[in-house]
Amino acid sequence: MLKIASPGAVEPRRSDSRPPRPRRPGSLALTGSLEMIGAPMTFARNGEIYGEGEPADYIYKVASGAVRMYKVLDDGRRQITAFYLPGDIFGFEVGDEHTSSAEAIGNTIVLVFRRSTVLALANRDGDVAHELWAMTARELHRARSHMLLLIKSAQERVAAFLLEMAGRMPASDEVELPMSRQDIADYLGLTIETVSRTLTQLENSAAIALPASRRVVLRNRAALQRLNAS
Amino acid sequence: MLKIASPGAVEPRRSDSRPPRPRRPGSLALTGSLEMIGAPMTFARNGEIYGEGEPADYIYKVASGAVRMYKVLDDGRRQITAFYLPGDIFGFEVGDEHTSSAEAIGNTIVLVFRRSTVLALANRDGDVAHELWAMTARELHRARSHMLLLIKSAQERVAAFLLEMAGRMPASDEVELPMSRQDIADYLGLTIETVSRTLTQLENSAAIALPASRRVVLRNRAALQRLNAS
DNA sequence: CGGCGGCTTGATCGGTCTCAAGTACGGTGG
DNA sequence: CCACCGTACTTGAGACCGATCAAGCCGCCG
C-alpha cells in the first residue's frame, strides 16, 4: 500500500493563460433556469485546469473531451473522484477554494464562467440558488455511489464502471473510453493490472468485446448487471 | 465478497409513531442564521429512524445518543456512510425521498423538524438557503474523505477512524465509541475480525490503549497520524 | 450458575498487488 | 513506405493482506 499512481507522466501545462476573456460564447444551461455565456478555453492532454487549494473563481462546463477530478494522498496514491464528459459542469465550490484538482484527460475544450456572476444571480433568483444546491446534491449522490463501488470486488467495480460510462455516453452499447487504464484504476481503487485482467475476463466470459483497448462493446448487459450487486 | 453484514440482529422498531407532535421544544441552530423549534423523539437501540426511499418530510438533529446512516447492497453487504453524534444534523435531502436509511445506534433522542418549514424559510431568506447548501456541501466533503479512506490499508483506515471520532468528541484523547465493531467494520469497508485485530495491533504498538472494548485512549497521536497517509 | 451477544484470537484460503516480461499501437524521422 | 521508438496495455508468477471459517473469551443479565 505504498505505491505511486503516476499522476500523469508529462508535467501538465494549461494551454491558455488562466483568467479567460470571452471570445466565442457558449451557453451553460443550469438545467433550464439559468442560461449563461461562457468563454471557451482549450486544454492539452493532461493539462491542469485547476489545483486543490487554488481559489475557485471559475466554474466549468465540458464542451468536448473529458476531465478527471482527483485528490492525491501524501504518499502519492491518487484517487479519481469523478470523470466529467461533454455537457457536465464541474469545479463548483461552496467555499472559496477548490477542494480537488482537475485535469484534462485528452485535448479538451471547456466553457468557463465566473463564479461571482453565478453567485450574484443566485442571490437574486431563488430558482438559480436551488439549481446550485441541486448540483451539489447530485455530486453528493455520485460520491456516495462511488463509495459503494469501493467496497466491491474487482469484477463488480469494473462492471459497474462500464455500465456507468455506457449510461453517460450517447451510443450506449459501444463505449469509447476517453481515459487510460491508470485513470480507470485510480477511479476504482484498483491497479492497472487488475483492471486489464478483469476486462479480459469479462471478454472471455462474453460479457463484453474489446475491438480496441479503449473501445468496449457491451455484449451482455444482464451479465454485467448481475456482477454489479445493487 | 458475498458476505452478509448483519444489518442489526433485532428487527428495528421506531419507539414513537412517525409524524411527531411538538412537545418539549429543542432548538436547531443552522449555524446561526436559523433558529428553530424541534420536537424531541426517542428511538430505541437499533430503531429505524427512516428507510431508503421513504418520503423525506423531516430533518433531524441528534440530541443524545448516536445515529448510523447506511445503504444496503442487494447481496446483503451494508455500507455505513456516516455516523451522527450529538449536535449533528442529518436526514436532509434535496429530493423528496431519503437516499439512505438511518438507525439509532444506542438509545437516542433526536429533535425533529418539518422539512417544508425549513424550505419555506429558505425561500424567503437567502442566508438560510445558503446554510442549507453549505450543509449539503459539508456532506459532500465528508463523503469524499470517506472515499479516500476506502482505498487505504486496514491500519490506515482504523487509525483515521479513531482520529476522526476523537476530533468529534468533547474529551478528545479518550474516545467512548457508541457503535459496535460491526458498525465500524461496515463504515471502514472491513470485517469485524480485521477491525478487532487492527485495534489490538495498535494497542501492542502503544499507539492506543483499550481499557474497555468501546473505550479507546489515544496514546500516541503522531503514530496514528503517520499511519494515516494524507 | 448458565446462557447469550459482542469481542478476540487462530489457521487457512483467496483475491488483489507487486514485480517482471512481453505485446500492440501511434507517431516520427529517414 | 518502412524502421524505430515510446507509451499504453496485456500477461505471467509469486507474495501478501484481509476475508473466511472456527474456537474461545469476556461481560452482562436472567
Image (cartoon, coloured by chain):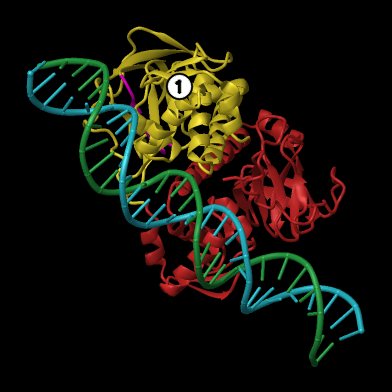
Chain colours: A red, B yellow, C cyan, D green
Q: Nearer the viewer, residue B20 or A86?
A: A86
Helix or strand or loop: what does disc 1 sit on?
A: helix
Q: Is residue A82 above or below residue B119?
A: below
Q: Position of residue A27 (x, y in %)?
A: 72, 51
Residue drawn at x 59%, y 52% as measured from the top left? A186
Answer with left or right where residue B104 lies relative to residue A79: left
A23 on left or right of B213: right
The quadrant in which the C terminus of chain B is found is top right
Viewer-closest of B136 and B105: B105
Kind of residue indicated by mark 1: Thr
Residue A177 image point, x, y percent: 60, 64
Whether residue B97 can be seen here: no
Looking at the picture, how far across and down is residue B161, in whole percent? 49, 29
- Relative to residue B154, is residue A62 depicted above or below? below
Q: Residue at x 56, y 45 (%)?
A: A1
- In the rendered image, residue A117 lying in the magenta stretch gets the answer no
Q: Position of residue A174 (x, y in %)?
A: 53, 71
Residue at image position (41%, 40%) is: B190
Badge 1: chain ID: B
User: Left or right of A125: which side holds C15?
Assistant: left
Q: Which residues are magenta?
A: B96-106
Overall secondary structure of the magenta section: loop
Label 1, on which residue? Answer: B117
